[in-house]
Structures are given as structure tokens and as C-alpha cells.
Amino acid sequence: MTTWSSEELTAIGDADELRIASRRTDGTLRAYVIIWVVRFGDDLYVRSAYGSDNPWFRRAKASGAGRIQAGGVERDVAFGEAAPGVHDEIDKAYHLKYDRYGAKIVNTVVGPQAAAVTVRLLPA
């Protein structure tokens, strides 16, 4: 199994924004979308602001694979599920990293509703 290096975890986890693109069925990448990313332990997570109807989220869930760019790192990834019981810690990570942008936007990616739209980024 491929894992993140400590350098990748730090670079991506410290990046304010992440660019994410899912793969089409022919293997080509869709256009990149800019989203927030947080680190919890040795894992990286993204969440869909405004729910499961967000187009990037639907495409990522359907394809299961894509590519990310953040903090000078570019990697192919698989889109996985978060382990049960980590959502409160992911919420805390979002608050710690992004509360400076205000509650209105941060609240779109935290709370009980955010668990269903959480994606664990797995290095491929």
C-alpha cells in the first residue's frame, strides 16, 4: 500500500488550498477545482461544501480516483471513505485551520452533515 511521506503530509496539510481533479472513464483528468484540505494524523481529508450535490464531489465519488496539487506536491490519489469516529477530529482541524475565514463558510464543511461528504485522500 502506498503511503504519504511525512514531507507530503506536511506540505499538503499546511497548504491553504488544494486543487483536485477526478478521472473520467477514459482516464483523462477533469478540470481542477480548488477546495480546502485538512490533515488528521497521517491522513488527508477534503469535504464538499454545500453537500453531496456539489459537482466535484459527485464526480470524485463516481470515479474513485483523481489527482491533487497542493503545497508543491502533485499526486495521483484514490478517493476513500473516512474511518468511523474521526469526524469530530476533522471538524476540529477545519476550525483550527480555516476559522479565520468566518463561520459562514467554515460551517459548510463541519458538523454532522459533513460526515457524509468527507473524502479521505489516498496516495496512488
Image (cartoon, rainbow, N blue to C red):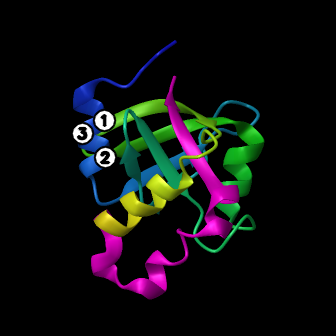
Q: Residues within 10 Å of mark 3 (few under 14, many from 20)?
A: some
**Left or right of residue 112, residue 73 in this image:** left
The local crowd at label 1, few if under 14, some if 14 to 19, many if 20 or more residues have their Cα within 10 Å, is: many
| Amino acid type, callout 2 | Gly
As drawn, 121 above or below 37: above
Callouts 2 and 1 close, C-beta under 8 Å = yes
**Residue range (magenta):** 97-124
Q: Are marks 2 and 3 in contact (CB under 8 Å)?
A: yes
Residue depicted at 53% across the width and 47% down the height? 86
**Mark 2 sits on what residue?**
13
Q: Residue furthest top?
A: 1
Viewer-side residue, 93 vs 19: 93
Q: Mark 3 = which residue? A: 10
Q: Tell me, yes or no, whether the two marked residues, 1 and 3, touch with CB atoms within 8 Å.
A: yes
Q: Amino acid at mark 3?
A: Thr
Front-most of 91 and 85?
85
